[in-house]
Amino acid sequence: MTSSSFQSTIVLPAPVCEQAAQHLEQAVQRAIDGAEIPLKAFRAAADNDFTFPVPVVEQAAACLLVLATETAQTVRPSALRAVISVALRLRDAVHLAHQPALSSRFW
């Protein structure tokens, strides 16, 4: 199967993008590797259509999971849940994008 059968972009809901941008700002402040690129993309989408390349969303999810790991012992449980929730929503969107499109043909 070729990679062309997979989505190359993901459209995310505005609230998820806003939350991701907030958490990515924290990741950049903590100097988490790779957080700058998705942060710029999520900030730029603030007035856009919230369409992102799959690798950017994947990188954002990974950075947020690292942020959650690094801050697990120092933040309130609700704050930790918020970061993890956004990271998992981004990760789930990436997994959906990696699934091949269904064809109308029967097997």
Image (cartoon, grey):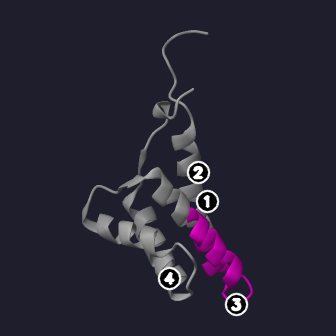
The numbered mark at residue 28 is 4
Residue 89 location, quadrant: bottom right
Q: Residue at x 58, y 80 (%)?
A: 32
Please state if 31 lies on the left or on the right of 37 as rendered: right
Q: What residue sits right under mark 1 in the picture?
A: 88
- Give the crowd class for mark 3: few <14, some 14-19, many >=20 residues within 10 Å: few
Name the amino acid, label 1.
Leu
Tell me which numbered mark, 3 or 2, is placed earlier along the sequence. Answer: 3
Tell me which numbered mark, 3 or 4, is placed earlier along the sequence. Answer: 4
Could you tell me which quadrant the C terminus lies in?
top right
Nearer the camera: disc 3 or disc 4: 4
- Gap in Å between the C-alphas at discs 3 and 4? 17 Å
Q: Is residue 92 above or below residue 29?
A: above
Residue 94 percent coordinates (x, y): 54, 49
Residues at badges 2 and 1 in contact (C-beta under 8 Å)? yes
Name the amino acid, label 4.
Val
- Gap in Å between the C-alphas at discs 3 and 1? 20 Å
Q: Residue at x 49, y 36 (%)?
A: 6
- Gap in Å between the C-alphas at discs 3 and 2? 26 Å
The numbered mark at residue 92 is 2
Q: Is residue 25 above or below residue 106?
A: below
Q: Kindly state the secondary structure of the residue where label 1 is placed.
A: helix
Residue 81 percent coordinates (x, y): 65, 72
Per the rendered image, the range of residues in magenta is 61-83
- Give the crowd class for mark 2: few <14, some 14-19, many >=20 residues within 10 Å: some
Residues at badges 1 and 4 in contact (C-beta under 8 Å)? no
Check residue 19 for magenta coloring: no
Tell me which numbered mark, 3 or 1, is placed earlier along the sequence. Answer: 3
